Amino acid sequence: MRFGTVFGALLSFAAFSFVAATTEEQDNLSGPEVIATAAFPESNAFNHVVNGEKNSLTVTVENKSGQNVTLLGIAGALIHPDTNVIVKNLTRQKYGVPLLENIQMQIPYQFYSQFKPGDHRLSIWLEHKTDDDSTFKVEAFDSIVTVVDPELSIFDLKLLSTYAMVAGILGGLAYFVYVTFVPQSKKPRAKKTTTASVSSPVGTVTATGSGGYQEEWIPEHHLRKGRSSKKQGAVSGTSGDELSGAETSSTESKRRKGRK
């Protein structure tokens, strides 16, 4: 009886030692108790990952280990849902902040997406270490997400400004190439010609049906002379064109002599 009792006690002690060693080994493998969860914002209820944009998640971390734990960083990866092959490793963000015991901390995590649209598995984890510089990983998010392309809008200011900048750059390059490589035709310089100012010709004087003249074609200074001569003739009592009586008689006598 004594041998059986001693043997049973030895077996019990060995089993207890084995369980304690296994538990300690598991604790060393799993690390201190740190709980981490990640979630998309409420505006993204369908867990969409938009290409060409920074996608944000909020990681909630709580240290329940009773030890001094330091958060090293947060990282992630996009994994093919069927083959479990990593499609792309996401940006790793470094922090290096201590995790206070039994206090929840919300830490933002952002990554840039440029992947093929479709369903992918998104995995997010955080890395932390203890005082003895042992490093551990804790999974924060592991779920299927949908990668989508952004919706195009004609009122998108960012897109319009990008197009305007690209158009300006291309226009400047095209103008530079045109000026540099396309031969330019040289225009001959126009010769300066000096022309003497010619006075306007005096219009011809035409007779009217009543025997008078159209005075609008006669220069002003001629009209003034004609008017002054008429005034002088009126004062002397004879017309400027009439001949005196002596001059008329002498003229007639000369004509008679010529006829004989």
Image (cartoon, grey):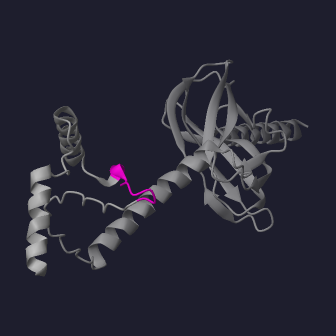
Quick check: is 240 in the magenta stretch? no
Q: Is residue 256 left or right of residue 130?
A: left
Quick check: is 210 in the magenta stretch? yes
Q: Which of the 4 quarters of the picture holds residue 191?
A: bottom left
- How would you classify the magenta stretch by its main secondary structure? loop
Work out whether 112 lies above or below 71: below
Residue at the far front: name it: 260
The residue closer to the viewer here, 69 or 167, is 167
Q: Is residue 116 left or right of residue 202?
A: right
Q: Quadrant of the N terminus?
A: top right
Identify the residue shown where x is 48% and y is 36%.
Answer: 133
Q: Quadrant of the C terminus?
A: bottom left
Residue at the far right: name it: 1
Question: Where residue 65 sits: x, y (%)?
Answer: 66, 25
Question: Where residue 99 sits: x, y (%)?
Answer: 59, 24
Identify the residue shown where x is 54% and y is 24%.
Answer: 98
Q: Is residue 188 visible in this depiction of the protein?
A: yes
Q: Is residue 161 left or right of residue 149?
A: left
The residue closer to the viewer here, 234 or 52, is 234
Q: Which of the 4 quarters of the picture holds residue 210?
A: bottom left
Question: Where residue 189 sits: x, y (%)?
Answer: 17, 70
In the rendered structure, which segment of residues is drawn in magenta? 208-216
The residue closer to the viewer here, 4 or 65, is 65
Q: Is residue 192 visible in this depiction of the protein?
A: no
Q: How many marks?
A: 0
Identify the residue shown where x is 55% and y is 54%.
Answer: 163
The residue closer to the viewer here, 169 or 48, is 169
Question: Where residue 87 sits: x, y (%)?
Answer: 66, 63
